[in-house]
Image (tube, grey):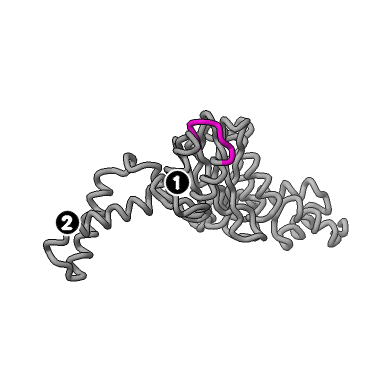
Amino acid sequence: MASVTAADIKKLRESTGAGMTDCKNALVEADGDYDKAVEILRIKGLKGVAKREGRAASNGLIASVVEEGKRGTMLELNCETDFVAKGDRFITLADRIVNSARGVNDPKEIVVDGKPLQDALDDAGALLGEKIEVRRVASFEGAHVAVYLHRTNPDLPPQVGVLVELSGENAEVAKDVAQHIAAFAPRYVTRDEVSDDVVAKEREIAEATAREEGKPEAALAKIVEGRVNGFYKEAVLVEQAFAKDNKKTVGKVLEEAGVNVLGFARFKVGQA
């Protein structure tokens, strides 16, 4: 039987991301053969895929790729622990998947190396010992597409990402607006995107709250309208106060730059 050294275990662990004990056991079973040990880890890991299905994958990272400022894709890749999330193998997997997802807006449509996405996720989960999933993906193509990735913790990969499409080329404004979206999390670009059902619910809540506060009947209509407008200022991008100059709205900044936001996606790891 070949001897298994700490260096052998370390090498296998760094290359696969599997646990130290699992690496040691695999090397022992493989009689010190590195390639065979990798295969053993994969086989044993795949057997555990079904068992991991019900586990929560609430950690992870945001990955992106932008081509010539015209096309961009961003996705959220999830795992179970921050230990795996910050590992080189997981980060490399995210880059591989996002480059395979260019132009895609549904994870089910992603194909990695000619195979369904789930095959790549199962293989990664087998080696890393965790549930791995792509929660969502977004792609834009237009006059100018930009991305901003934000690290909420310097020890972890990006946890917040914003992909934004402008009607015209303006890298500075695109960056500023993407950073603003990351910080203030608007839900819509303009009021036109807010459905009638959402507005009706906001009016209902505003009226019920005002009545609960004992506001006079004669003032209810004005109070409700004011609170609905407050909702717009919080939820609609162009009506929010601009992060870098709160005397202006984002809409005013865009107007002065001669561009519009045609769409955006904001992902935060673990949040819907």
Segment colored magenta: 165-172
Mark 2 crowd level (few <14, some 14–19, many ≥20, 10 Å Cα): few
Which of the pair 26/217 is nearer the observer? Answer: 217
Instruction: Decide if residue 80 is on the left or right side of residue 106.
Output: right
Residue under label 1: 250
Q: Is residue 58 above or below residue 68?
A: below
Task: Quadrant for residue 27, please give it.
Answer: bottom right
* Magenta residue check for 57: no
What residue appears at the point 62 percent right and 36 percent down from the top-left corner?
99
Place of residue 235 in the rendered image (x, y in percent of width and height, measured from the top left): 37, 51
Q: Is residue 261 above or below residue 32?
A: above
Residue under label 2: 221
Res. 198 mark: none
Dot 2 lies on which element? helix
Place of residue 228 in the rendered image (x, y in percent of width and height, measured from the top left): 27, 53
Place of residue 233 in the rendered image (x, y in percent of width and height, measured from the top left): 36, 52
Find out whether the residues at labels 1 and 2 contact each other: C-beta distance under 8 Å.
Answer: no
| Quadrant placement of the N terminus | bottom right
In the rendered image, is residue 265 in sight? Answer: yes
In the rendered image, is residue 272 in sight? Answer: no
Dot 1 lies on which element? helix
| Amino acid type, residue under disc 1 in the picture | Val
Instruction: Decide if residue 170 is on the left or right side of residue 209.
Output: right
Which of the pair 101/222 is nearer the observer? Answer: 222
What residue appears at the point 41 percent right and 51 percent down from the top-left corner?
240
What residue appears at the point 24 percent right and 59 percent down from the top-left corner?
205
What residue appears at the point 44 percent right and 49 percent down from the top-left corner?
248
| Amino acid type, residue under disc 2 in the picture | Ala
